[in-house]
Image (cartoon, rainbow, N blue to C red):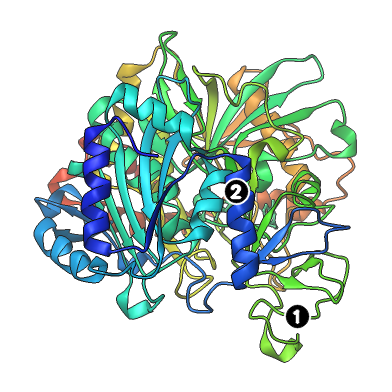
Amino acid sequence: MTTKNQELANWVSTVAAQTQPQEIVWCDGSDSEYQHIIDMMLEDGTLSSLNPETHPNCYLHLSDPQDVARVEHLTYICTDAPDTVGDNNNWMPIADAKAKMNALFDGCMQGRTMYVVPYCMGPIDSPYSRCGVEITDSPYVVINMKLMTRMGAAALARIEQEGGFVKGLHSIGELDPERRFIMHFPQELSIMSYGSGYGGNALLGKKCHALRIASWQAKDEGWLAEHMLILGLESPAGEIHYIAAAFPSACGKTNLAMLIPPEEYKDWKIWTLGDDIAWLHPGDDGQLRAINPEAGYFGVVPGTNAKTNRNAFDMIQRNTIFTNVAQTADGQPWWEDKKEGVPSIDWKGDAYQSSNGPAAHPNSRFTVAATENRAYSSLAEAPDGVPISAIIFGGRRRELAPLVYQAKSWEHGVLVGASVASETTAAATGKVGVVRRDPMAMKPFCGYNFADYWGHWLSFSERLDKLPKVFHVNWFRQNEDGDFLWPGFGDNLRVLEWIIKRCKGEVDADETPIGYLPNAEGLNIDDLGIDPAVWQSLISIEPEQWRQEMDEFGEYLASFGDRLPAKLKAQHELVKAALAS
Ligand code: GTP
Ligand code: SPV
Ligand code: MN
């Protein structure tokens, strides 16, 4: 196979000349191709079969133990000027980055197969979708791209028809953390990733293309590329409202997007459109319309069980690739909080011993096609996407942030999004559980200067006739013993119900300096058995704590200097003044 697109053909030849693979394979995205690569990987041991009786077509990949998460300190945006990318990114001059990466890529595919992987982010027939081609020497990447994107012949046909595509060059190299870089060149729509096989570092359609490169394009073209789930909430009356929610990595997007309502809400239904990335465009109807650029889920495994996320739990019983989970003696996948089975072999492939730490890596992941989810929305493939009624921001905060509050306006909503801070998780290397600023849950993913990004967000008040309402949630408040105060998971539906009622003007709320909070009757906690004092603490704020928070946030905003939009600064002043009075 080759291509009619001269630019692509030339690029593939150039890369082949540089990396010197033994063989070049153009991926067509067929099921037989997928199975062939799986068989090859089973043969060479980079994949093993899980129990075919209980988990048909499920496979396990154990990565290099030093290659289990995104590496933010090795991720760069390379442009002609550092101020375009801001202090929120690592920057490198284009020429320096190219020199560094070319040295790594020279001859790096000797003895290996080079796969050419055309993919489309978004439905093949959507005007909002964008294509890319990833060149990789990792069969693991190819099979994951098959599940996560519209990969192969149809994507190539679209590229040949419309011309432009993002160029992503990837090699696992030696998997040496000292020789590992993820470089983005937004001005030439290209990515170079070396030395890691892990999801966010290696599946280039995902965070590299659909967030870092796409956010840059979106700023120029008048749309948004966000780290957001998309769900449809269907009421018993059959009315569906679409909601997009941005939470930092491993802070609950997949779980919310697949939520199963609690018993008291059994006539309600949540439909999943996406669990990680949303592309939001002003539609012809004046509303913000969302598509999910992805076609699969790369989800956190630990914590998934029949109670927390039944849809996901059932979905990953078949046709799933597991990465870095443990196994039971009879070859079933196992992880912490699975609530069934016992581990026999840990994620490193050693006999399990509790003294060695968790059996499954805390950032172990499943990869599965979106169509395997029984709650997959019938509109998930709609070329025009779905209209968004509410945008939710959230973080993992053991204290401070209440269960839910609503921003007072779009401008205030942008401030609320910018103010997101969250405890770090195992999704990225580094310390876990440290609160850090993560505006719009995009700290690791915004491909340009946050000050300009906030300005871009503010501009949507002029681009839309009907602005979504903006909210902030926190499922993760804890008591002194470290127990969660809010049951979370299915019961988060109660919060979504309140949010939609607020959108429709059906329920009153208490106005506070930080926004509207539910009053005692507004949010339904019937049958939850939650302690009244605990409930009060979940829906109220401590002014002194918030004054401190707003001071710290103010210092952070000030670090963006003159570039910070005046409107955002003014919103911050308003909240501070309200807290002071
Ligand atoms: P990325 O894929 O990294 O972007 O993460 P995500 O935002 O999709 O996170 P995910 O839904 O996979 O949740 C991560 C972890 O948080 C899992 O271990 C979940 O079990 C846990 N979690 C999700 N929702 C809740 C909740 O409402 N309450 C509590 N206590 N934990 C939750
Ligand atoms: C995240 O870390 O936010 C993820 C997993 O969704 S990765 O695709 O690796 O970025
Ligand atoms: Mn994510």
Mark 1 Cα within 10 Å, few/some/many (few <14, many 20+)?
many
In the image: residue 59, left or right of residue 249 = right
Mark 2 or mark 1, which is nearer the start of the sequence? 2
Specify the amino acid type for callout 2. Answer: Tyr
Q: Secondary structure at mark 2?
A: helix
In this view, the residue in front, 171 or 89, is 171
Residue for badge 2: 34
- Report how far apart the C-alphas of labels 1 and 2 lie in the structure: 27 Å
In the image, residue 521 above or below residue 563: above
Determine the residue positioned at 22% across, 68% down. Answer: 106
Q: Is residue 344 above or below residue 435?
A: below
Q: Which residue is mark 1?
A: 345
Q: Position of residue 575 (x, y in %)?
A: 38, 42
| Foreground residue among 458 and 180 | 180
Instruction: Please say whether residue 252 is visible from this viewpoint.
Output: no
Relative image position of residue 370 (x, y in whole percent): 64, 38
Mark 1–mark 2 contact, CB under 8 Å? no
Measured as percent of width and height from the top left, residue 489 is found at 74, 48
